[in-house]
Image: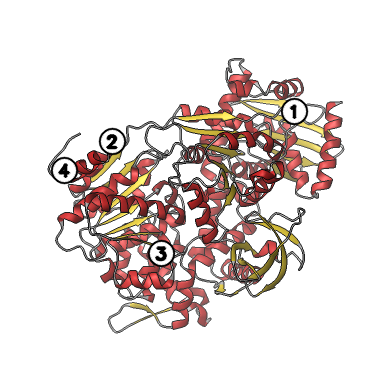
Amino acid sequence: MKDSSALHPIYTWFRECGQEPFAFQESAWSAYLAGHSGMVNAPTGSGKTFSLMVPIVLQGLQREQTEHLQALWITPIRALAKEIKKAGEEVIKGLGSPWKIGIRTGDTQTADRKKQWENAPQILITTPESVHLLMATRGYENFFKKVQVVVADEWHELVGSKRGVLMELALSRLKSISPELRIWGISATIGNMEEAQAVLFGNWHSERPTKITVVHSEIKKVISIETIFPDEIETYPWTGHLGVKLVAKVIPIILQSGSTLIFTNTRSQCELWYQKLLEEMPDLSGQIAMHHGSMSRELRDWVEDALHLEKIKAVVCTSSLDLGVDFRPVETIVQVGSPKGVARFVQRAGRSGHQPGATSKIYFLPTHSLEIVEGAALKEAIRRDIVEERIPFLRSFDVLMQYLVTLAVSEGFDSDQIYEEVKSTFCFNSMSPEEWILVLQFTVSGGSLEAYDEFRKLGRDKQGLYRVTQKRVAMRHRLSIGTIVGDNALIVKYLSGRKLGNIEESFITKLNPGDHFWFAGKSLALVRIKENIAYVRRTKAKDGKTPSWQGGRMPLSSQLSDMIRYKLDTYAHGSETDEDILALKPLFDIQQSRSKIPRQDQLLIEYFHDREGYHLVLYPFEGRYVHEGMAALIAYRLSHIKPLTVSIAMNDYGFELLSDRQIPIEEALSHNDLFNTNQLQKDIWASVNTAEMARKRFRDIAAIAGLVFKGFPGKYKKERHLQSSTGLLFEVFKDYDPQNLLFLQAYDEILTFQLEEARLRSALNRISSQEILLEKPTVATPFSFPIIVDRLRERMSTEKILARIKRMKLKLDS
């Protein structure tokens, strides 16, 4: 322990607590006290918060005047704020500091926000959205002028989202307001760590001499992974079929652990699993709870507190408990279904053993047999220390337009100064002066929409500053700040007035009064809908519907795709030793007898005919987003040989083209250009309904940019009205302003994030060098079966699809 004079108070406190700091914490302390900015890269549960909270408080003790706000601590989720505050209070008490620490999020009461504004704590824990709300308040420059440091916690979660762009813009402003500002990030390991640092710091270090230190933890997180196997391996798997059948196998895990977190990938799945656990073992009533983002803050707080105090045995949850929340009593994690990414799996595993040196225990529960391969691939990726990249957003003009109105609502802004600040960010570094003028003109007058008053938002005052000229615009803007866009939500309340949470309009408006549904783990009956409130009452019914939320399925990451192909390759070569993979021998035997299991240097294509038509199934194992684009591309190129009408279905493993006519696959393969990347973007635009895809993407862009207003609290506009408005705007730009930056952004985002053009190009280049295995089975194979079932599920009810699957399996087994 290096007890330097500057760090002496820290070491004294640590000794009194019987603790010893880790080397990475000491490195961060020294760098911070030396005036550096930087990044702390350390695994979950290793003491990352103390690595920065400690020197921030210590330096505060050494400064004479610290009555203003000194530190902004940014967290991506509200649940994490309480944990950071607890750690901060521990440091403040341990070092004998008079500082105060506060939280400001969307859950903070108006009275508390007013107090914070008038008498700010020295440390404020907040979210990107709340920082922008503060910037939309007159006097914000004075509020932030003494800030010494901004800490971006869980930066790996923000960097790949538009919330990260909000942070880039906020930091660009704070650097000008506070000359002594330092910026620190805290991040788990990601595949593009250097790029993530560039996003956080922007061009700052080239503008003024600022030392940036990257601190890496030497701590290696140990993760114990165990797969929960069904009693019998399904040889013809299909998505979601197996999961709930394994509920009985989760009960002993809950009972033998002090407390357990059961992670699901969607809120609907969370609601369903909570119900099924109670059906399987009613005695768990009162001992298990649920936690997801649509539940009320009060309910979520109760669950978090009950976990801390060890009052409950298990919580069924979603990503709402993904990040650094420290639940020390949690011993075990259960992951229901593949998380589709290595980083997400590691993050969730780290919720158990959430302290330095402890082993994290996680059970992987597959929802169908082939997901066992994904579980084995996750183990392999973790063994190799492989994690995903987080692709940062570039040129997000919708966020920039929102930001300009934020500045105009409060103090106003000088266009030349803000242009230089915005250009210093990673997101807008490539923006040209001409594009800046277009952004400014559109924000001021609506550009091609200037004939309509509602799009004329800004004017210039006598000093030449851009300001909002109408109170209505300012009021609407403050209610719309943020980049999280989803379906309109209605508040769910008992008749007594107690709030349960929020539910999407598209689900609740399909119910009639008296209909039953499940929400927050409770069986409810809809009483009535009034404005934006759905009034409900408790029932004892067991037959209610489970709500659905936007979001849906996550695509397989590129890194996990690589590992799946690797695990199949080792099995095909007979060199696989992983018991999880070997357990799939019954399924693989049928696949081998009817088709093939591809090696890494092979692409498997299956072509067969039945009463539905001609099935062409390809297995790139690249994830559903890539397969969506590749399927349309291949269909388009095949149609050049022979006119075809096809239907397309895909999952994370492959895709199917189904036609009522023979598909000329052999001829196409003989031409050697089916998978080439020549004129790829042109062929993509020709093969998919890009206009419809862009129109859907534009809905969110328009909402973020402030082109549509969702309504005042209690009087939200209906979703169909909003869709109609954004659809009309899209058509106006398409016909009269095709160079509109927001219109073009919609197409750029489709290519980058939906069709994943870069990954699609890489996959096609890989396939071009592979051996093509064209197999002609007489019937569907275990690999093609789940893709076919997914297609049928889109147009059949649950009862009909179950009967159809039963008939299909009988035929395949015969």
Where residue 612 appears, as percent x and y from the top left, is: 84, 40
Which residue has dot 3 on it? Answer: 130
Q: How far apart are labels 4 and 3 at the CA level? A: 36 Å
Q: Earlier in the sequence, mark 2 or mark 3?
A: 2
What is the C-alpha distance between the residues marked 1 and 3? 51 Å
Q: Amino acid at mark 2?
A: Phe
Going by the numbered disc 4, the residue's amino acid type is: His
Q: Name the quadrant of the N terminus.
A: top left
Residue shown at 39% from the left, 49% from the top? 155
**Residue linked to disc 1:** 235
Q: Residues within 10 Å of mark 4 (few under 14, many from 20)?
A: few
Give the residue type that dot 3 points to. Ser
* Residue pictured at 59% horizontal, 37% vertical: 254
Q: Is residue 296 above or below residue 311?
A: below
Work out whether mark 1 precedes mark 2 in sequence or the reverse, and give the earlier one: 2
What residue is disc 4 on?
8
Secondary structure under badge 4?
helix
Q: Which residue matches tag 2?
A: 22
Q: Are marks 1 and 3 in contact (CB under 8 Å)?
A: no
Q: CA distance from mark 2 to mark 3?
A: 33 Å
Residue 739 in view, yes or no: no
The image quadrant that residue 356 belongs to is: top left
- Image vertical order of residue 377 relative to residue 29, above or below: above
Of the pair 379 and 793, the residue shown nearer to us:
379
Circle 3 SS class? helix
Q: Residues within 10 Å of mark 1 (few under 14, many from 20)?
A: many
Left or right for 47, reference 639 = left
